[in-house]
Structure formats: structure tokens, C-alpha cells
């Protein structure tokens, strides 16, 4: 391989589309108008005293949700999956406690954020092709837009630098990938986790949520899947889509006695404002096709969102909180499969009163598909 040359300075960033409402988002003004119907006596003192949770106020919150859903239906009109375009700008190998993964950085024309795909597919790091003309056991999980040319005249060194290579890079080996003539579809249904960014849970180890644990568990489950193949989409949708600033404000309302749903609604936001059009486009770019995916989630809304976006969910794989696993009389296979010495945030078992309230709210208020454990003695 010759000397390293500068990567082209031209920009391949997708131009943002005109600002428009997202298909699974909510319009805060509609929620605010519905929340104005709450009794005038609702003050911070009432919230602290628990008055916000009485039946009348819960009914008002339900009405707010219904109004948001009606607004949502209007927002969805005219939006199709063709509105979303994604491009993998670069990928690299990351060694982890669960084995090597490829980190993909995506740009899109929807929200201007850099969403990530974490792909586990160790067979791609093998230097040799299957012997004696044998077919590969699995179609490699590769980004189509990564392997296409970023510009006319792109050199092999430029392709390698942005991650469009085959096998593993080293000082003595570097082979650029071939430019594909057509999009390739996977021949299996890989494990997929659609994960939303959580600074507090993943970086600080906050006990208000189980986000760090879920990310760690997803990587563990994928590491034990056939071929150790799977995908974690890491979406920049902090706080179920409301952003870090609003999430911090919601935390203060939670300290005053509200649960996660009530706190979001009290801020005039939806209980969950995340969208999944970009996620579906990323999965298609990685080759997900007619065989669909096995989705790691307890959230039926994610399953429904994928189906709406044209991604077939062949199986929903539950993610039982580790503390709840330990309380169960029956052992959980996921717990037995955990690698010893994993250092990712969320790698251990934690419990707290706030985490317990958060988990139960997801089941009782948001319809997550988990069996509640028996109360702790």
C-alpha cells in the first residue's frame, strides 16, 4: 500500500430536507391546550402532595394523549418512507468486551443528527474466503451507501480511510471493498436493538433508568446469537425524543412526585416523541429485507413503528431487567450468558426505588410487555 494521501475535502453530507413534522412525533401546542383543561388548583405544591395522580387528573392526561394522537394522525398524512434518505459516512472497528464491532456513522436528510449503527459480524474480519467454493454461511451485514463511491474518481485510499474495506486493516493488509452493482439483502433475521441515546444513564450511570443496562444486555445477547451477528442502532433521541434540556426539567418534576409520563405531559411534551423513519432507512441500508429482524424490545410501539416503515419483525425478543431476573424463581438464559468482566456502563445489576418506579411506569402506563415481579419482601 502506498503512502497515505489526504482524504477529499468535498462534503458528502446529505442536504437537510425542509423542516416538517415527524410521522411519530407530537405537536407540543396541542398538548398544552389539552393540559389547560387541568384543574386550576394544580400547582407545584399539589404535585408535591401527590394531587396530580388522582383519577380526575389522570383522566385529563388521557385526554391530552388522545388529542396528541389526533394531531399525530394529521401529521402523518403525506409522509412516506421515501422522504428519508441516509448515508453511511464512515465506519471503523471497535474492540469491546463482547468482541469486535463495526461502528457506522450515518447522516440523513431528516433531522441533521449523526445516528450510529453498531454492527457485530465477526466473519467480516476473517482474511480468507470460505474454502473449496463453499458459500458464506451468512450474507455480510454491510452498508450499501458506505460501499458505493462517495464521489467520482474516489481512490482506494480514500475508500479505506472512510471504512469501505474488507477483512481487517493492518500495517500489511488493506483492501478496499468493491463498489456494489446492486443492494444486497441479508439471508437471515439478525438480532436488532433500536436504542435511544441516554447521557444520564449510559455516561453517568443514573439509577433513574435502565438505559445503560439495556445497551449492555443487547450487546451481550448479540454476542451469543448465531454467527455473533446483530445490529444496535444508536439513535440521538435523548429523553424519548424531547432532548436533554427538557429531560433535565422532567427529572425535577419527577422529584416532585410525577412519574416519567406525567412529567413529560406537564412540560407540554408527548410521553414518547421518538421517530423511527431514520432507523428503518438505516436497517435497509444495512441489508435488512424480506427476512426481517428479531427485535430486542419490550415496547410494542417500536414493533408497530417498524412494521409501518416496512421492516418485518419476525420475533420480539424481550429484555427483562436484571434485577427482575434475579427475583424470578426461574433462571433467565440472558443472565447465564453474560460475559464476566464486562466493563460497559450497565454491566452489573443495580436496583433503586427510582429505577423500580421507572420500570413499573413503562409497564403500567406505557404498555411495555413485561411481567411485573412480586413485591420485594
Image (tube, helix red, strand yellow):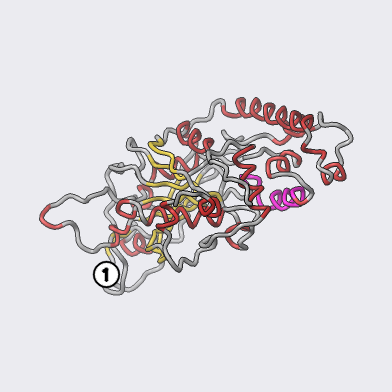
As displayed, is residue 151 above or below residue 204? above
Q: Residue furthest right?
A: 41
Residue drawn at point x = 54 percent, y = 52 percent:
327
Q: Identify which residue, 376 or 186, lies in the foreground.
A: 376
Left or right: 241 in relation to 214: right
- Magenta extent: 240-254
Q: Identify which residue, 321 or 36, lies in the foreground.
A: 321
Overall secondary structure of the magenta stretch?
Answer: helix
Q: Which residue is mark 1?
A: 173
Image coordinates for residue 356, horizontal then vertical, percent: 64, 50
As displayed, is residue 108 above or below residue 170? above
Q: Is residue 251 magenta?
A: yes
Residue drawn at point x = 38 percent, y = 41 percent:
293
Q: Residue furthest left?
A: 132
The secondary element bearing badge 1 is classed as loop
Residue drawn at point x = 43 percent, y = 43 percent:
317
> Number of labelled discs?
1
Q: Identify which residue, 5 or 68, lies in the foreground.
A: 68
Give the quadrant of residue 155. Answer: bottom left
Q: Is residue 209 visible?
A: yes
* Mark 1 crowd level (few <14, some 14–19, many ≥20, 10 Å Cα): few
Residue drawn at point x = 43 percent, y = 59 percent:
338
Amino acid at each position: 500500500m502506498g503512502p497515505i494521501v489526504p482524504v477529499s475535502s468535498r462534503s458528502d453530507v446529505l442536504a437537510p430536507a425542509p423542516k416538517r413534522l415527524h410521522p411519530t412525533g407530537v405537536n407540543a401546542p396541542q398538548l398544552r391546550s389539552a393540559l389547560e383543561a387541568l384543574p386550576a388548583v394544580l400547582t407545584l405544591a399539589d404535585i408535591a402532595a401527590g394531587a396530580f395522580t388522582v383519577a380526575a387528573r389522570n383522566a385529563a392526561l388521557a385526554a391530552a394523549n388522545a388529542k396528541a394522537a389526533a394531531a399525530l394522525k394529521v401529521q402523518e398524512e403525506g409522509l412516506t418512507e421515501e422522504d428519508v434518505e441516509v448515508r453511511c459516512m464512515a465506519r471503523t472497528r471497535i474492540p469491546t468486551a463482547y468482541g469486535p464491532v463495526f461502528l457506522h456513522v450515518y447522516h440523513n436528510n431528516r433531522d441533521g443528527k449523526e445516528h450510529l449503527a453498531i454492527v457485530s459480524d465477526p466473519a467480516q474480519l476473517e482474511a480468507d474466503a470460505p474454502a473449496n467454493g463453499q458459500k458464506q454461511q451468512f450474507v455480510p451485514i454491510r452498508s450499501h451507501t458506505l460501499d458505493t463511491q462517495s464521489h467520482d474518481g474516489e481512490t482506494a485510499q480514500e475508500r479505506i480511510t472512510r471504512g469501505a474495506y474488507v477483512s481487517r486493516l493492518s500495517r500489511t493488509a488493506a483492501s478496499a471493498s468493491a463498489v456494489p452493482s446492486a443492494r444486497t439483502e441479508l439471508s437471515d433475521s439478525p438480532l436488532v436493538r433500536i436504542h435511544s441515546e441516554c447521557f444520564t444513564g449510559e455516561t453517568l450511570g443514573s439509577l433513574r433508568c435502565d438505559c445503560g443496562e439495556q445497551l449492555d444486555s443487547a450487546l451481550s445477547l448479540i454476542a451469543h446469537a448465531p454467527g455473533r451477528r446483530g445490529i444496535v442502532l444508536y439513535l440521538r433521541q435523548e429523553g424519548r425524543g424531547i432532548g436533554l434540556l427538557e429531560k433535565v426539567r422532567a427529572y425535577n418534576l419527577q422529584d416532585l412526585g410525577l412519574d416519567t409520563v406525567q412529567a413529560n405531559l406537564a412540560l407540554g411534551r408527548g410521553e414518547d416523541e421518538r421517530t423511527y423513519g431514520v432507523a428503518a432507512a438505516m436497517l435497509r441500508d444495512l441489508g435488512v429485507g424480506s427476512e426481517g429482524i428479531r427485535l430486542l424490545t419490550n415496547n410494542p410501539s417500536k414493533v408497530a413503528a417498524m412494521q409501518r416503515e416496512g421492516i418485518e419483525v419476525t420475533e420480539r425478543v424481550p429484555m427483562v431487567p436484571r434485577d427482575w431476573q434475579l427475583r424470578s424463581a426461574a433462571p433467565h438464559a440472558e443472565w447465564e450468558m453474560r460475559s464476566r468482566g464486562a466493563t460497559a456502563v450497565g454491566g452489573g445489576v443495580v436496583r433503586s426505588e427510582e429505577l423500580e418506579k421507572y420500570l413499573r411506569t413503562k409497564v403500567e402506563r406505557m404498555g411495555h410487555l413485561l411481567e411485573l415481579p412480586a413485591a420485594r419482601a
